[in-house]
Image (cartoon, helix red, strand yellow):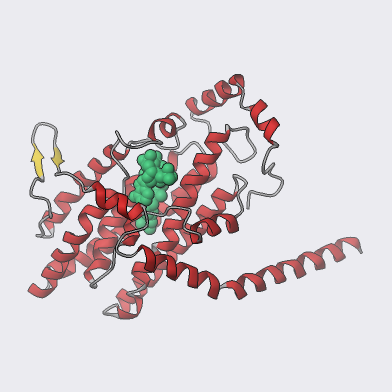
Amino acid sequence: MYTQGLDQRAPEGAAKAADDAAALVAFQARIDAEEKIEPNDWMPQGYRRTLVRQISQHAHSEIVGMLPEGNWITRAPSLRRKMILLAKVQDEGGHGLYLYSAAETLGVPRAEMVEQLLAGKAKYSSIFNYPTLTWADIGAIGWLVDGAAIMNQVPLCRCSYGPYARAMIRICREESFHQRQGYELMLKLAQGTSGQKRMAQDALNRWWWPSLMMFGPSDKESIHSSQNMAWKIKRVSNDDLRQKFIDVTVPQGHFLGLTFPDPELRLDEASGHWLHGPIDWTEFNRILAGDGPCNRERMAARRKAHADGAWVREAAAAHAAKRANRQRAKAAE
Ligand code: 3HC
């Protein structure tokens, strides 16, 4: 949508010359003054690269994230639940599309980003490599996973890059609906039969730690945070967002009458924060390396969907070419 007329890739020499000290100072001054950077504005190559990395990873996460929940659409226990889940999964697909469009404004074609995902070269969120074993997992995903996503993504509405910030506004509104439907589902289960309550507790036990890992490595280990924060792509650190999420979510879990799978979880009266036990970063790193419970299954499903959709892409491209030819012929009359 924004790519027409965009100077996609500056020649190597020109990019180097442009990245000189004066340009960098002027760029940082714009960021510090809270100006939005737009697609045709000058930007350091590192800023462009980091945005492409983050926005494309985010887009891939939305698309891969459709798989664990999509899996339950046919098994939803009522028509109402089926409609809600269908709408939610469809929303996630839409989020992926806005985000690919936002990344394209930086000069990278969507086909190239998708290719990197399918080739296993691009990351997507660790959380989507866990299985959805019971219906309660759909509630836990909405409550915890979408809840964590909102906590991380509301600050992105103030990201310095205009197209990303604007895409995030709508995405956050929809994620907020997703979080509420998840919590409502958990509430129904928690108030239901003892079997339903057990199912809700089991889902919380399995999704709690992976949800905390969604925020990324600790601030000490986060390689991109300091530069991303200076560029105001990221506004709040991984650990601070994680803590905010825990502080909001623990009382919600207690209201449901559920317990958290962390024996060290306790309220620190002095700070008002819920203190948590150690996170298993070995598990996180294993997932990032492609060896989580469902990494292979997710990538196989994505590759199959991409291959199955080839005829749709071909038909759309042929239709677009036909329309363009017709318009050109009309303009020449
Ligand atoms: N899963 C996979 N990779 C992760 C990760 C996670 N949960 N957390 C961090 N990483 C990766 C980073 O991408 C980076 O890898 P790279 O250098 O190869 O790109 C590495 O771990 C180091 O992490 P950093 O903290 O240094 O990286 P960032 O400063 O980029 O912070 C982030 C990580 C917080 C995830 C940030 O990129 C971000 O805010 N991204 C946008 C939000 C996003 O992608 N969310 C996906 C969640 S799912 C979702 O939104 C779908 C919804 O429907 C639920």
Q: Quadrant of residue 307?
A: bottom right
The answer to whether residue 214 shows anywhere in this view is yes
Quarter of the figure with the C terminus = bottom right
Apparent side of residue 157 relative to residue 15 in the rendered image (left or right): left
Seen at 64% across and 29% down, the residue is 16
User: Front-most of 325 and 17?
Assistant: 17
How far across and how far down the image is residue 156, in percent? 42, 42
Apparent side of residue 22 relative to residue 302 in the rendered image (left or right): right
User: Front-most of 24 and 178?
Assistant: 24
The answer to whether residue 193 shows anywhere in this view is no
Image vertical order of residue 102 relative to residue 229, above or below: below
User: Front-most of 201 and 253?
Assistant: 201
Number of numbered labels in the structure image: 0
Seen at 49% across and 51% down, the residue is 56
User: Front-most of 292 and 306?
Assistant: 292
How far across and how far down the image is residue 292, in percent? 31, 60
Seen at 8% across and 43% down, the residue is 266
Apparent side of residue 142 relative to residue 300 in the rendered image (left or right): left
Give the residue furthest to the right.
333
Image vertical order of residue 77 relative to residue 133, above or below: below
How far across and how far down the image is residue 175, in percent? 36, 56
How far across and how far down the image is residue 234, in percent? 41, 37
